Amino acid sequence: MGARRISVRAGRGRVRLGLVARPVNPRWARAAEQLRVNAGIDPTVESLLGRLTAIVGQDEAAAAALAVKAVVLIRRASALGSLVAAVVAMRELGATWWFAEQEGGAPGPGRMSPAQFVRLQPHRVDMGVRYDPLEALYGWAAENVADARWGVPLDDQFYPDEGFPARLEPPVGSKPGDQLVVAWEVGCRCPATVVIRPDGGLVAEVDRENLLRSTPVEAWWAWHHLAGSTPQPLPGEVAGTGNDPYSVALDRGAAEPLRLQARAMDPSVPEFNRPWVTVGDALRALDAAAESLRVWAHPPDLSVPSPDPWVTIADALRAWDAANTRRSNPPPWPHWEREMQALINPRP
C-alpha cells in the first residue's frame, strides 16, 4: 500500500472558503468571472500573456510563452493554466515572486526561481502527453499562496493511500480546541480541530466537508473549464498558415477509425459526425468526449453533484468512480483516448 504525505498547518485568522466552478452549463460565466476576479484576465491567451507582461516585463513573458510553445499540444491548456496560477500568485504576493527561489517540484538542479525555471532546456523536448513540464509553476504558486493565507507547516505525517483520513495525530504542543489546517493536495487545505480522545490523548478531527482552495487552484481550474483541450494559439501562430500547429494534417487512415469509434459510443456529439482533417479537429473531439462522459456519468435528471473539471478522459473516469454511480459497462474511452494522443502527437 502506498503512502501520501500530508502537512498539518496552523490556521491564521479567518478561513475563507473559495468558490470552485463546476462543469454544468453556467460554468462558462462563473469560470470567466473567477479569472477576472482572481487573475485579472479574460479567458484568452492574449489577455493572459498581456497581464504577465504587465507584471514581469516583455522578456519574462516571452520566455514563458516559449516554454508553453515547447509543450506538446495536448498539454498546452495545462501549461497555460500554470501561467494563470503564477499571475494569481503575483497579484497576491507581489511581482518579486517570479524572481524568488523556490524549492522542490521542478525537474532541475536545486533551488530556482520561476524566471529560471521557464528557461530550462527540458521544456524544449517532448516529455510525453501526460506530463506538463510547467506544472511546477502551478505547484509553487498554489502552495505559496496557501501558506501565506493559512500558515506554514508545523508537522508532516504519512498515511495509507486509501482515502483522506478523518483523524490525525496533532502537532507536538497542541491543546484541545486548537484550530489546524491540513494540507491534502497542492494548494488545498481542510480545517481540523484538536479534541480529547476517550483514552485521554489528543487527536485532530478533520472537517472533510470544508475543502479550502487557494486562489491559484481556483484560477487554474477555471481556465480548464473554459479551455479544455480546444486549440489555444500562441502569438505568431496564425490560423491556416505554416505557423499554426493546429492546422497540421492528420493521418486520415488512423483518424477515421477513431472517429467512427467515438460516434458509436455517442452519436449525438457533432464533433464525432464530421471528418477530422487537422490536429485542431482531433483536439476539439477530445474535449467533446470528456463532456460526453461527464454527462453520461452525471445525467441532468440525477441529483448528483457534478465533479471537479475534467481535463482528460482519465480524469472523467476517476470522477465517475469517485461518485460511485451504479452503472455498468462504461464505454471504452481510456483506450480510445490513448489512441487519440498518439494520433495528435505521433512519435518519430
Image: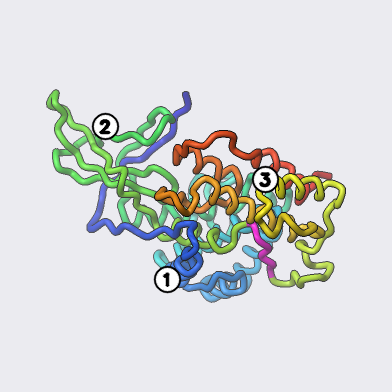
The image shows residue 241, relative to residue 187, as above or below, that is: below
- Lateral position of residue 202 relative to residue 210, left or right: left
Which residue carries the number 3 mark?
265
Instruction: Indicate the amino acid at tag 2.
Output: Glu
Mark 2 vs mark 1: which is more N-terminal? Answer: 1
Mark 3 vs mark 2: which is more N-terminal? Answer: 2
Q: Which residues are magenta?
A: 229-234
Q: How far apart, in angstroms, are the residues tagged by discs 2 and 1?
A: 37 Å
Picture residue at 64% right of the left edge, 57% below the top: 229
- Lateral position of residue 24 relative to residue 313, left or right: left
Q: Residues within 10 Å of mark 3 (few under 14, many from 20)?
A: some
- Lateral position of residue 213 relative to residue 318, left or right: left
On-image quarter of the C terminus: top right
Picture residue at 41% right of the left edge, 55% below the top: 144
Q: Nearer the viewer, mark 2 or mark 1?
A: 1
Question: Extreme front residue here?
Answer: 301
Which residue carries the number 2 mark?
169
The image shows residue 29, relative to residue 311, as above or below, that is: below
Q: Nearer the viewer, mark 3 or mark 2?
A: 3
Whole-percent x, y for residue 317 in the image:
55, 41
Whole-percent x, y for residue 214 in the image:
39, 56
Q: How far apart, in angstroms, are the residues tagged by discs 1 and 3?
A: 38 Å
Picture residue at 84% right of the left edge, 58% below the top: 249
Q: Is residue 39 visible?
A: no
Mark on residue 37?
A: 1
* Magenta segment main secondary structure: loop
**Residue toward you, 316 or 195:** 316
